[in-house]
Amino acid sequence: MEQLKTYAPLITRLFLAAVFIPAGLGKLGDVAGFAGYLTSGGLPAFLAWPSIIFEVLLGLSMLIGFQARWMALLGAGFCVLAGLLYHFAPADQMQMIMFFKNLGIAGAFLMIFAHGPGKLAVDKA
């Protein structure tokens, strides 16, 4: 059980990093297209670059466990907001799956916020 307590936070952080680093870097291929997508949810296009930078920094923070609690709290808010603005469409089953995926990821971030990044992190929990 102790090994699980040691490695579970690390594995959780690695899984979160595996979502956010490629997502942020992938948006660099079409920043204008991403800016257009942002406007479809009601956000201004100028938030494209801050969003991309945030996603990459969030993933890196989870990867190494630096400032993980605060970044996890911000990440949870980011996921809930993105889910509500871009995926909450009760008539569309696929969008609702994406919405609940976002809520699940937000839950993982809240666990990191509540319990810390674990022993195997730059910030020790």
Image (cartoon, rainbow, N blue to C red):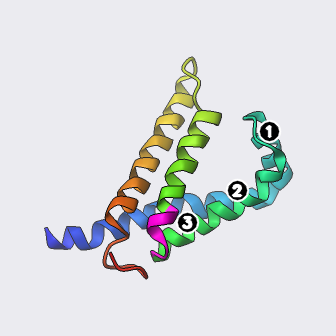
> How far is the residue under mark 3 from the one under mark 1?
24 Å
* Residue 55 part of the magenta-drawn span: no
The residue most toward the top is 91
Q: Does residue 72 appear to the left or right of 10 in the view shown? A: right
Mark closer to the chain start, 3 or 1:
1
Mark 3 vs mark 1: give the one in front: 1
- Of all residues shown, which one is farthest toward the right? 32
Name the residue that disc number 2 marks. Answer: 51
Residue picked out by circle 1: 39
- Indicate the position of residue 8 as horizontal and vertical percent values: 29, 66
How far, Cα to Cα, is label 3 from label 2?
Answer: 12 Å
Q: Residue 3, image x and y in percent?
A: 19, 73
Q: CA distance from mark 2 to mark 1?
A: 13 Å
- At x 43%, y 56%, the residue is 109
Where does the image place residue 48, in percent across and percent down from the top left?
Answer: 77, 53
Q: Is residue 24 visible?
A: yes
Label 3 neighbourhood size at 10 Å, few (<14), some (14-19), many (20+)?
Answer: many
The span picked out in magenta is: 65-71
First along the sequence among labels 2 and 1: 1
Looking at the rendered structure, the kind of residue marked 3 is: Gly
Q: Amino acid at mark 2?
A: Ser
| Residue plotted at (42% across, 66% down) | 13
